[in-house]
Amino acid sequence: MEKEENQSSDSAVLEEDKGNKEPDESSKNIEKKPEDKIIELEDKLARAYAEVENQRRRFEKEKDDAFDYGGFSLARETLNLIDNLERSRTALKNDENLKNSEALTKTIDHLDIIQKDMISILKKNNIEEIKSIGQKLDPNLHQAMMEVEDENKEPGTVIEEIQKGFMMKDRLLRPSLVAVSKKVNKKEENTKADKKSEENQSKSTKN
């Protein structure tokens, strides 16, 4: 009898322990329905396709940029030749020993032809001069090197081009170096006028 009672009490304890045990980890993960699995796979597939499409677009853009702007550095270096031709023209024109000579005229004509040919070649390759004179200063296209007082021009108007700027399609190859107009300082003008009148008065007094 005692053995039977002990066995029954032990089995009761075992049953109680089983009831207190947490469910197994595998039982926590409820089996996904086939429909849910399909939706999950479709989502993963859509993400993978989008990533491949983005990579393809990036590759296409890089390829187009390489085709359109592959000669960007070469074009920028070529502009130095145009600058040097312009400097040569200016230097020859200012040479007192060559002024009004037939040799100077022929040399200038040849330099002009070379310069025009180079500008034409640049245009064929989608490289255009930036229009500056008379334009409003545009920080995206122009770089102001100095300000000049001019009462006939609206402030910020380009009145002189120090170095030509160029665009390659829609990209800035180099900005134009320019001088822009600014308002005439009335105080300075009055001061200068007063000084001149004083000088004139002093001269007339001496005489």
Image (cartoon, rainbow, N blue to C red):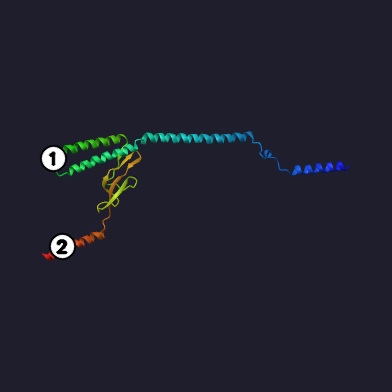
Residue drawn at (30%, 49%), measured in percent from left and top?
A: 144
Residue situated furthest bottom in the rendering: 205
The answer to which of 154 and 96 lies nearer the viewer is: 96
Secondary structure beneath dot 1 equals loop
Q: Position of residue 159 (x, y in %)?
A: 26, 48
Please state the horizontal and vertical placement of residue 16, each as a whole percent of the image: 77, 44
The residue drawn where x is 59% and y is 36% is 40
Query: Which numbered dot is residue 101?
Result: 1
Residue at left offset 83%, top offset 42%: 8
Q: Which residue is at the front of the view, 27 or 138?
A: 27
Please state which of residues 132 and 94 is positioned toward the viewer in this rendering: 94
Whichever of callouts 2 and 1 sits on the residue coming sooner in the sequence is: 1
For label 2, the SS is helix
Corner quadrant of residue 1:
top right
| Residue at the spot of label 2 | 200
Left or right side of 102 for 181: right
Q: Give the residue type at disc 2.
A: Asn
* Screen quadrant of the C terminus: bottom left
Distance from disc 2 to disc 1, alpha carbons, whole Å, reads 44 Å
